[in-house]
Amino acid sequence: MFGRVRQSWGRFLDAWRTESSADEDRRTHNLFEAAAAYVSACAEDDQERIDEAAAWVSPEALSFGVNELACRAVIALARERDESPRSVARDLLGLPAA
């Protein structure tokens, strides 16, 4: 009986080790890494990198990450320029001042 348990446990550990080493080969990316890679690739018009970054996470997660990146970028530029985020966002989009 103990031999079977030990054998089953050994197979489980072997399978787990195999999965762990396979996972180490495939690096996972979080949504913020994907958003940063996606936006920078878009800015450089690099379609290959755009497609690669878009495949890292779900479309919903990528959309959230891009939105968060945009918010943080506008806030950072507003602080740097000593302007409101609204005026910076409108300026970046080429819209007239409100």
Image (tube, rainbow, N blue to C red):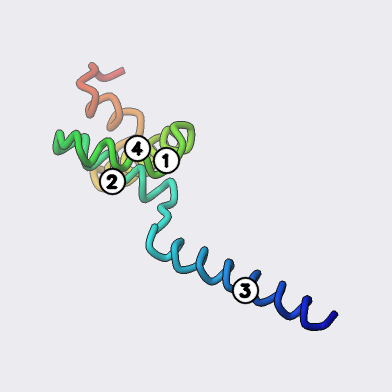
Q: Which image quarter: residue 12?
A: bottom right
Q: Which image quarter: residue 7?
A: bottom right
Q: Distance between the residues labelled 4 and 2?
A: 9 Å
Indicate the amino acid at tag 1. Gly
Q: In this view, does 31 lie to the left or right of 37?
A: right
| Residue that label 1 marks | 65
| Residue that label 3 marks | 13
Mark 4 or mark 1: whose residue is earlier in sequence: 4
Q: How far apart are marks 3 and 2 (CA)?
A: 36 Å
- Badge nearest the viewer, 4 or 3: 3
- Badge nearest the viewer, 4 or 1: 4
| Residue that label 4 marks | 54
Q: How many marks?
A: 4
Please tell me which residue lies in front, 12 or 66: 12
Q: How far apart are marks 1 and 3 (CA)?
A: 36 Å
- Badge nearest the viewer, 3 or 2: 3
